[in-house]
Amino acid sequence: MKNVVSISAFLAFSAASGLTAESAHAAPVTPAPPYGLPKLSRDDFNRLAAQSGSPLFWRTDAETPGDLDPSELATTGTDLKLRAKFVTTPKTPDATPTFTKAFEKEYRSLVELRRREAVRLELEQGRPTLVETDTSAYSAEDKAVLAHLLKAGELIDALYDYQYGATGLDKLIPKDDLASRAMFRRNHGPWCEAPKTEADPFCNATPTFAKRVTQSYPADAVVDDAFCKALPNEPNGKDLIGPFTVVRRAKAGGFEAVPYTSPKAYGKPMKAIAKELRAAAKAITSGPEFRMKAYLEAAATAFETNDWVLADEAWAAMAGSKSSWYLRIGPDETYWDQCGLKSGFHMSFARLDPDAEKLKASLSAIRTDMETRIAALVGDEVYKAREVGFNLPDFIEIILNAGDSRSALGGTVGQSLPNFGKVAEESRGRTVVMANLYRDPDSMQASEHKDGLLFSAATLAMRDPSGDAGQMTTVLHEATHNLGPNGTWTVDGKKPEEAFGGDLDAVMEELKAETGALFLLPLLKEKGLLTDAQVSAAYHAAMSWAFGQISQGLSTIDGRPKTYSHVGAIQVNHLIKEGAMTWDPADGAGTPDAGRFTIQFEKMPAAVESLMKQVVTIKAKADKAAADALDAGATSPEAAASFQITAVQERIRRFPKATFFYGLR
C-alpha cells in the first residue's frame, strides 16, 4: 500500500490547518463533487479507489456524462449496508439521493492521490543536472565576495517567488509530501510547467490547488489579454506599462504605477539585497576588481532608488575589464509576466572564461558589417543602419542562477542586456554565452538521441557533436538583439511593447535574433571565420533547437504564446514552405518512429534571407497586422501539421529536460 502516500496524514493536516474548499486559495465551491476540486474522470476514480483500498466504484456514466451521480455509485465487498455510508437513502419516493460527508472525505482522498501522481510526473520530466564550481583556488577576497553574493542569490530567489505570487503557499503542503515540496522549490511555486503536466488541472503542489496571482497587477483584476491591451490606453498608460513598476488601483479610480522600491511593492526585500551587495563591494580591495566593486555599489543604489541607469552604466563598463567575475543582478526579462511588461528579478553569477577573447575580437571587428548587412535587406527608406557599439560576447562559467534566471526546466544559454534605458538605446549592452551549461555528458547524449529521431542520415552527417555549432548560433542570436530595429526602436513615438503588445513584441524580437543568427552565417564564412561544414552544422543546431522549443507546446495553459516555441514554429514553417527543409515519411519505415526531416543546406541562405527581410520590415515599421499574420500563419493547426508537431512532441518529450542544480566544492 505504499502508493497510498499517507492520505490519512493529508486529511489530518487538512482538518488541523482549516484547508477546506472555502480556503482562500481553493477553487470556487460547488454543491456536489468535485467540491471545488478538479473533477476526477471515471477511469481515474475507479483506478485510484482500487489502488488505495477504497470500496467505491463508479458503475456507469450515463446520467450526467462526466459527473458522478449518486445513482451511479456502487460499493465493493459483501456488506449490504456499506453503500448507505456514502449515499443517503431518500425518505420519500420523489426525494433525490445525495452524497454523504463520508463520501466527500473519500473523494478528497482520491483527488489527493491524483494530485500527487501529477506532481511526480511533473518532476520526472526534469533530469537533475549538476553545475559545480571548484573554489579551491579562490583567494580570501574571492571567497568573501562569493559568500555575500550567494546570500544575495537566496534573497533574489525569495523576492522573485514573491513577485511570482508564490510566497507562503508552501505552508499549504502536507509535511509528508516531499515531492510537492521539491516541485515548489524547483518551479518557484506550486504551478506545473512541464509539457505533459502544465495543462493537467490536478498538477499543483498544494492540496487546495492554489491559483497564481502575481504582484504585478491588482489582486482582484482579471489579468487577461483584454486587460493587458487596455493598460497602454489608460491616461497614464506609459507609466503603467513601465518595466520597473507594479500596477495598483488608485484611490481616485483607475490605476496607478507604483515603483518597485515602494513599500507597496518590493521595497523591504530590495533593501536587504542592497545590503548584501554593499557588503560584497566592501570585501573587494584588489585593483583588478575595481569595476566589479563599482558595479556592486551602483546595483545596491539601484535596489534602493529604482533608478537602474547608473547600475547599467557600471555594468557595461565591466566589459573588457580585467575582472574575473560576471554578475548581473536586478529586474530584466519580462517573459514571466502575464502581460509581458514587468521585469523579473534575477541574478546570474559566474566566472569569466578568458580563452574566448580571440573569438570576441574577430566578431567585434565585423559589428558594423553585421548591421549594414541587415539594413541592406530592407533599404534606407525602411531602416537605416545605425552606429553600433555593443560588446561581443563574454563566455562565462555559471556559478549560480537565481530568481527569474533559475528555470524549472532548462536554462538560458545566451543573453543580451539591458533591455531598457540609455545603455540599451545606445547599443552599449553586454552579451554573454553560458559556456558550461548543457556540456555535461548526460545532456550531450540526450541531444544526440533526440536528433537521431528527427533528422535524416544526410542531415546528421553535418551534425557537430561537440556543441560548438550551437554555441556559435547562440553568440550570433545575442549579437542580433543589438542589431537592426531593436527593443528601443520607436515608430510614431511608440516603443515595440506599445506597438505590438508585450507577448507579440517578445516573439518578434526573439524571431529577429534567432533568424539573424542564421542570416549572418554566410557573412562569417565570407570573413573566413567559418567553413562550409561549420555553417551547415550551425544550421542543423538551430533547427534542433527550434524543434526542441516546438516540443514544449505553442501556448501556455492560459492561452499566452510561448515565445521561443512560436519562434521555432515560424522558422520551421517558413523553411518548409521554401523547400529548405523537407519531411520524408518513408525514412525509418518499419520502425515506430518513421519519418525524418532533411535540411536542404544549399537552399538555406535564400530561405533564411527572405524570412529575415520580412521580420526586419515588420519590426522597422511596427506593423502589428503583419506580425499577427506571420505568427498566426505558422502556429495554426494546419501549419503545425505541416511540421509534424505531433511526432516532434511525442519523440522529444521522451527525454527529460535538464533541471540545473548548482554546487560548490
Image: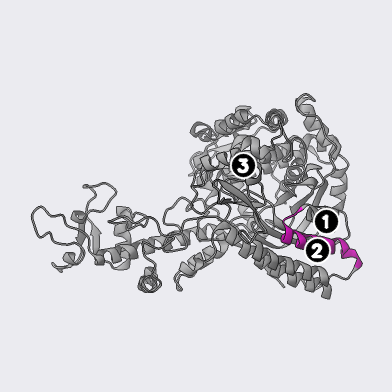
| Residue 551 x %, y % | 55, 45
Q: In which quarter of the image is residue 613?
A: top right
| Residue 340 x %, y % | 61, 46
SS under mark 3: helix
SS under mark 2: helix
For the residues labelled 1 and 3, say whether their Cβ atoms are less than 8 Å apart: no
What amino acid is at disc 3?
Gly
Q: What secondary structure is the magenta-colored segment mainly?
A: helix
- 306 drawn magenta: yes
The residue at the point 58 percent across, 45 percent down is 339
Of the image marks 2 and 1, the number of the one nearer the N terminus: 2
- Relative to residue 100, is residue 288 drawn left or right? right
Of the image marks 2 and 3, the number of the one nearer the N terminus: 2
What colour-coding does the image apply?
one colour
Regarding residue 464, the answer to whether it shows in the image is yes
For the residues labelled 2 and 1, say whether their Cβ atoms are less than 8 Å apart: yes
Quadrant where the N terminus is found in the figure = bottom left
| Residue 124 x %, y % | 51, 60
The residue at the point 35 percent across, 73 percent down is 8
Where residue 297 is drawn, which disc sits there? 2
Residues 588 and 402: in front is 402
- Relative to residue 278, is residue 265 drawn left or right? left
Magenta segment, which residues? 287-308
Q: Mark 1 points at which residue?
A: 314
Q: In which quarter of the image is residue 407?
A: bottom right
Q: Mark 3 points at which residue?
A: 502
